[in-house]
Amino acid sequence: MDYGFVKVGAAVPEIKVADCGYNAEKIIEIMGKAEDEGIQILVFPELSITAYTCGDLWQL
């Protein structure tokens, strides 16, 4: 029976600064796990693919 609920998830992938290929692989792995668990909406932190640099974190 469908009650109209949406299963939502939040994820924080393991990332490496400026390693877009690695970061994308980790994001895709998490997306697969979320799909297996029936999650319909999955959110990630901003800039998960590129990651922040120290300059961004310290607002230089």
Image (cartoon, rainbow, N blue to C red):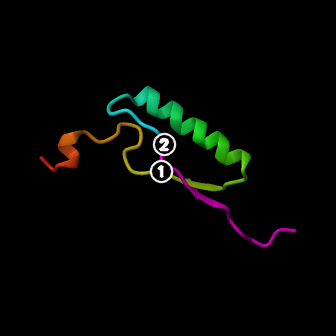
User: Mark 2 is on which residue type?
Assistant: Pro
Residue that numbered label 2 is attached to: 13
In the rendered image, which quarter is residue 15 located in? top left
From the top left corner, tell me how far across and down residue 44 is, in percent: 48, 50
Magenta range is 1-13
Magenta residues: mostly which secondary structure?
loop
Q: Which of disc 2 and disc 1 is earlier in sequence?
A: 2
- Residue at point 11%, 46% (across, down): 60
- Residue at point 73%, 45% (across, down): 36
The answer to whether residue 37 is left or right of residue 25 is right
Q: Is 14 part of what is drawn in magenta?
A: no
The answer to whether residue 2 is left or right of residue 52 is right
Q: Residue furthest right?
A: 1
- Residue at point 52%, 50% (across, down): 11
Whether tag 1 and tag 2 are in contact, CB under 8 A, the answer is yes
From the top left corner, tell me how far across and down residue 20 is, in percent: 40, 30
Residue that numbered label 1 is attached to: 44
Q: Residue furthest left?
A: 60
Helix, strand or loop under label 1: loop
Quadrant, the N terminus: bottom right
Residue 16 lies, with reference to residue 13, above or below; the image says above
From the top left corner, tell me how far across and down residue 18 is, in percent: 32, 31
From the top left corner, tell me how far across and down residue 50 is, in percent: 35, 36
User: Mark 1 is on which residue type?
Assistant: Phe
Q: Nearer the viewer, mark 1 or mark 2?
A: 2
Helix, strand or loop under label 2: loop
Q: Which residue is at the front of the view, 17 or 4?
A: 17
Residue 28 lies, with reference to residue 43, above or below; the image says above
